Image (cartoon, rainbow, N blue to C red):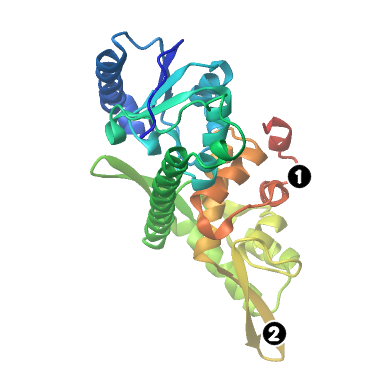
Amino acid sequence: MIQPRKQINNIYAYVRVSSEQQVTDGSSLEEQKKTIQAFVQSKFNRPVDEFFVDAGVSGMKDLVDRPGSRAMTDIMDEHDVIVTTKLDRLARSFTEMVNMIPKLEDTGISLYFCEMFGETPVVLPKEKQQTGLAAKMDMVRINNRQLVATLAQFAEFEREMIKSRLSGGKIAWAEKGYSIGGHVPFGYSKEYEDHGSRRHTKLIPIPKEQAVLKTIYALRDRGLGARRIAKQVSSLHPDYENFPIHKVVKIYSIGGHVPFGYAKEYENHGSRRHTKLIPIPKEQAVLKTIYALRDRGLGARRIAKQVSSLHPDYENFPIHKVVKILGRKFQGLSQAS
């Protein structure tokens, strides 16, 4: 196995949790810190010089996109040591981990996963005296890289499983009539329910607005256009005087492009054929994610990244589509970083 060098400058520790509950009670963060402190004291007979913490930050994000790990990589230098408990605390991406190893070696960093390999480093600085074939055939280093790469593949597989569970869970709640964020559709109001340690939002039908919806659908089935439907709604429902035309169009498709989140379904009404918008569960879940992230103040670029991360079927979700969904007046694109 690779033997660690004796010269050490700084010892840095990296700890991370992704669960908001763990951030609140601090249990996981503190446990990671205690484990690392005990390891460093036993191994190097000195304390950790500095802890870098990412609290409530997903491991699905790249190292440079997390404030704690970004700060650590900005200051690390030759003969420094980085200690973390497990590989998945540092990275869950196979590609990122494989690309990271040679960079750490070239920089002169020693990396330890203390709960996985104990005192055996998984990355060490390159031996400067080794050149040519000797450097290329360093089998110990090659085996170490392959081991870390294999573990990174398992970490990435676990990440994909987590993403799948998150996406599937949200769709399941949506199908039960619960909201998973975003705007409340016309005809419904929000009602909060506690389910164990989580609070879910259920959509409750509003009788008056449901009556308006029935009127809109009935008038559309009779072949009326958006403007006439809006007038009829204003006439038949005194509480909804001057009902806006754009709301009619949003509730029931009347020409134009099919908006994201819906599919067309054709219905024959006498000699006319009308197009009804049918919600697509997966795209509806994406819409609710976009609206929820917008309400949290995220810009278009970050929203697109989060959508790609939370919804495996929508990898590389385009930024322009986020802007189009949220409207031209949305200024999130300028906030993106």
The residue under the point 41% across, 53% down is 157
Q: CA distance from mark 2 to mark 1?
A: 32 Å
In the image, 179 versus 77, the foreground residue is 77
> Which quarter of the rendering shows the C terminus?
top right
In the image, 9 versus 254, the foreground residue is 9
Give percent across and percent down for residue 140. Answer: 42, 39
Q: Amino acid at mark 2?
A: Arg
Q: Secondary structure at mark 1?
A: loop
Above or below — where is 256 with respect to 115?
Answer: below
Number of the label disc, if any, that sits on residue 273: 2
**Residue to which mark 1 is pinned:** 328
The residue under the point 44% across, 12% down is 7
Q: Quadrant of residue 333?
A: top right
Is there CB contact under 8 Å for labels 2 and 1?
A: no
Above or below — where is 121 with respect to 200?
Answer: above
Mark earlier in primary sequence (2, 1)? 2
> Which quarter of the rendering shows the N terminus?
top left
Give percent across and percent down for residue 269. Answer: 65, 87
Number of callouts? 2
The residue under the point 26% across, 40% down is 197
Query: Tag 1: Cα neighbours inside 10 Å, few (<14), some, or many (≥20)?
Result: few
Q: Amino acid at mark 1?
A: Arg
Give percent across and percent down for residue 241. Answer: 64, 52
Above or below — where is 10 with respect to 108?
Answer: above
